Image (spheres, helix red, strand yellow):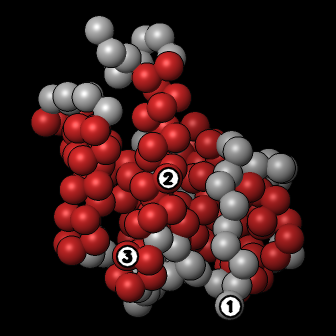
Amino acid sequence: MARPESESESDIGKRLRLLRKTLGQSDVKAFADELGIGKATLYNYEKGDREPTSRVLTALSEVFGANVHWILTGAGEMFADTSAVPSRPNIHTIKPDVFRAVGRLVTSLHKVEGITLPPDALFDEQSSAYNALIERAEDPSDADELTSLLPWLETRLKRQLAAAKASPGTGKREA
């Protein structure tokens, strides 16, 4: 079994990992090989220890149709031209049972903390939590693996809520 991926310290690293997983690539080595780089180099990019070179950004664009502007800034669409995206059989879809479980978890943790969010904000929190779960998974299409990661997600959300309540300006502090 592969080692669990550590959380990225950079936004670019998070977007690179999301791109790889969106393309259905749970095998880091295979993805790195397609880019012409080593597995450790890709790990360093995704972890945020290094930033991708222009050659790697060009390869991401040419090989996978990735939008370099999105990789660097988060603005725009993930793919520059969706018709250029190679067909991938393993692109994951939302698992309704897991999404509902994540939604119940987010709702209950907010309730325990006495935090009431408007419906749109609550949905944003649920979506963000589900995306974090998918990013953490080795195989985002495996509902059993996603379900087994719910305790990790709960711990992460509790920490985030505690930090948000303690920080001014988040709108989550008690009145």
Sequence-earlier tag: 1 or 3? 1
Task: Report if the CB atoms under discs 2 and 1 are less than 8 Å apart.
Answer: no
Task: Report if the CB atoms under discs 3 and 2 are less than 8 Å apart.
Answer: no
| Mark 2 Cα shell of 10 Å, populated few (<14), some (14-19), many (≥20) | few
For residue 155, the mark is: 2
Tally of numbered discs: 3
Where disc 1 sits, the SS reads loop
Sequence-earlier tag: 2 or 1? 1
**Residue 169: x percent and y percent?**
43, 11
Sequence-earlier tag: 3 or 2? 3
| Amino acid type assigned to the residue bearing label 3 in the image | Thr
Q: What residue is at 53 percent from the left and 46 percent from the top?
A: 70
* Res 81 visible: no
Q: Is residue 33 left or right of residue 155?
A: right
Image position of 18 with respect to 160: above or below: below
Q: What residue is at 25 percent from the left and 28 percent from the top?
A: 114
**Residue 171: x percent and y percent?**
34, 17
| Amino acid type assigned to the residue bearing label 1 in the image | Met
- Camera-nearest residue between 76 and 8: 8
Q: CA distance from mark 1 to mark 3?
A: 17 Å
Q: Which residue is mark 1?
A: 1
| Mark closer to the observer (2, 1) | 2
| Amino acid type assigned to the residue bearing label 2 in the image | Thr
- Image quarter in which the N terminus is found: bottom right
* Res 47 visible: yes
| Mark closer to the observer (3, 2) | 2
Image position of 61 with respect to 13: above or below: below
Q: CA distance from mark 3 to mark 2?
A: 14 Å
**Residue 103: x percent and y percent?**
23, 55
Q: Which residue is mark 3?
A: 147
